Amino acid sequence: MKIFNQSHRVTFRDNLVLDNPESAGVWWDVGNNDAVFVNNYVEGATNGFMFEISRGATVAGNVFIRCNRGVYILNSADARVYNNTFVDAPASFERNQRSATGDRFGWHPSTGPAVDKREGHVFANNLILATDAYRGPLARFEQPAAMCGTLTRPMAQATGGNVYVRPEAAPVLITWSPSTAEGCVARAASIEEFRKVAPTFETGGQVLDATIRSIFKGPDMGRYELRQPLQGVSPQAMPADIRKLLGWSEEDARTAGAFPFRR
């Protein structure tokens, strides 16, 4: 589904989006402002939620299952991604040199943030899980090496309180750019390694060595509620307006992922 360009305050809530292996699940395509994407279930899409050349999005309380990218923020600014559950569906924040100059659709880039303003994202309190079927990074913040000298500020304003789950160590947990690493993208295999690259980010984040069935009540039946409380979670404070959108109490918000633990 595409949200047509240059829309304002479009809300997509409480939907089931299935089997879009060759297309985006829901795609806000250029020039959009203040999108709201809450309480949706997306499975089997190329990109579960895509936000391109746009500004201001709230993505909260969603479940993304087996998507090439669960959340795909591209050439955009000020996306807030709070308390979502990802299974074999990485979260990806990316930017490149695309601008109105020399672009095939020149007016497209002119509707969103300029090349040097594609930043300000918050990625917090998400539960990102990989099974044996997925071995790639769980969170990606990437830009081309050619832009490393000009785009020196991170895309993210803040990341923290995220819980990464994988049954055993995978080669890369998080990719991060800009960086002094080769190709401008650092590849961290652990939270500790990531904090050496970006010391002020991923506060309260942790990695759990667990399986999908030890985390969720019934993943084989599409039940991704927590089996038990996540131990040692240090969530970031959820903004009041997002709690209102989700209908959560302050107690509910003291967790990671799309579902508070309720007995």
Image: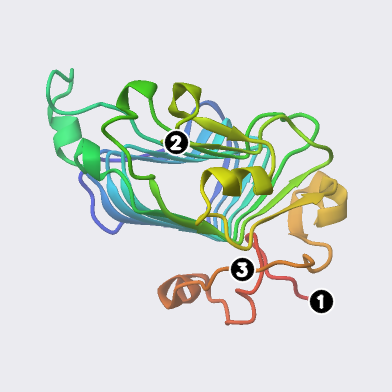
Residue 31 is left or right of residue 261, and the answer is left
Structural distance between the alpha carbons of marks 3 and 2: 24 Å
Q: Nearer the viewer, residue 163 or 219?
A: 163
Residue 29, position in %: x, y? 30, 37
Residue in view at x 29 percent, y 36 percent: 151
**In the rendered structure, which amino acid carries the disc numbered 1?**
Arg
**In the rendered structure, which amino acid carries the disc numbered 3?**
Pro
Tell me the number on the disc at residue 235: 3
Q: Nearer the viewer, residue 67 or 165?
A: 165
Q: Where is the N terminus found, in terms of image quarters?
A: top left
Can see residue 45?
A: no
**In the rendered structure, which amino acid carries the disc numbered 2?**
Ser
Mark 1 and mark 3 lie on one chain; the one further toward the N terminus is 3
Q: Which residue is mark 1?
A: 263
- Quarter residue 257 falls in: bottom right
Mark 1 and mark 2 lie on one chain; the one further toward the N terminus is 2
Disc 1, SS: loop
Q: Nearer the viewer, residue 137 or 250?
A: 137
Callout 3: few (<14), some (14-19), or many (20+) C-alpha neighbours within 10 Å? many
Mark 3 and mark 2 lie on one chain; the one further toward the N terminus is 2
Q: Which residue is mark 2?
A: 177
| Numbered disc in front, either 3 or 2 | 2
Callout 2: few (<14), some (14-19), or many (20+) C-alpha neighbours within 10 Å? many
| Numbered disc in front, either 1 or 2 | 2
Structural distance between the alpha carbons of marks 1 and 2: 40 Å
Identify whether 212 is placed above or below 2.
below
